[in-house]
Amino acid sequence: MAKIIGIVGGRAGDIRLLRKAMHVQSVRNTASISFYRGTMGNRQIVLCQSGVGKVNAALAAQTLVDTFHVSTILGTGIAGSLRSGIGIGNLVVATKSQQHDVNFTALGYPPGVIPGMKTSVFIATPAWVHKAYRSAHQLGFPVYKGKVLSGDEFVASPQAVAHLRRTFGGLCVDSIGAGAIGQVAYKNKIGYTVIRGISDKAGTTPSKNFSRNSRIASLKSQLVILTMLIPNYSSSYHTQQVSGA
């Protein structure tokens, strides 16, 4: 039986290019999420838009496991940079993920630790990390590997960024659930990684170019996934669109 790959995007724009590249065979609606089942190249794929937030991401990811029996989940979307050297339009491939807004410190747990879990830092599958990193290089996109943080907030203060750097050491932070996808993958013993395009610098208010930057960052993330999954994928048109970012 062919292995099935699940793909989760947080926003509509995070799956638009992927949806166009798919040969869709069926659509199933569960918990107000549409799951597109079909193929990309010779790969069996189930694609969905989860919505923003960790609960939505976890709901989508667990449905991919329970209903479609995926062996791997790939996440696509945007994030804010936590590092001065990682600029808008760059990419981050998650080697691990964590939820930064888990807080049971009053009970003696370190920040980010989920009580009762053996780990709260979810290691991505090295083979998928390598594929994503290599694909980004093939496309000519600046790319980094490291920890992706998740929380149900838009991080807009310098103080919050300093806390995230000091406490968790992440490269970027999202609100579309990399940490939740990582936890679902860990609990179900399946593979995962997420690819995040950098749309903004965390710790600042969104600029007037935020919408444009988000669109380009999301497009780059999707192009990496297409290059990972489809042999000899011709991305020249879309790569030209984002090459100036």
Image: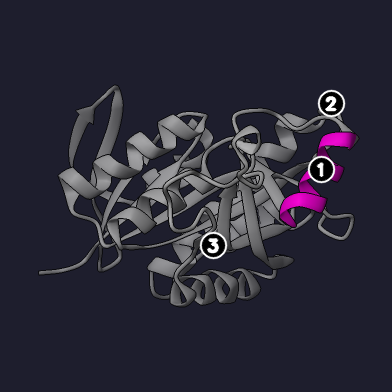
Cα gap from disc 2 to disc 1, whole angstroms: 26 Å
In the rendered image, the quadrant that contains the N terminus is bottom left
Mark 3 lies on a secondary structure that is helix
Please give the residue where the numbered disc 1 appears in the rendered image. Answer: 163
Determine whether, in the image, residue 8 is placed left or right of residue 34.
right
Measuring from the top left, give residue 173's x and y in whole percent: 68, 44
Spatial CA distance of label 1 from label 3 is: 30 Å
The residue mark sitting in front, 2 or 1, is 1
- CB under 8 Å between callouts 3 and 2? no
Q: Position of residue 90 (x, y in %)?
A: 74, 57
Look at 85% across and 27% down and name the residue there.
Answer: 205
Q: Earlier in the sequence, mark 3 or mark 2?
A: 2
In the rendered image, which residue does mark 3 sit on?
224
Q: Which residues are magenta?
A: 159-171
Q: Is residue 32 magenta?
A: no
Is residue 88 visible from the viewing direction of this image?
no
Mark 1 or mark 3: name the one nearer the start of the chain.
1
Identify residue for label 2.
208
Find the distance from the CA under tag 3 to the CA under tag 2: 26 Å
Q: Residue at x 54, y 37 (%)?
A: 176
Q: Is residue 169 magenta?
A: yes
Amino acid on which disc 3 is placed: Val
**Helix, strand or loop: magenta stretch:** helix
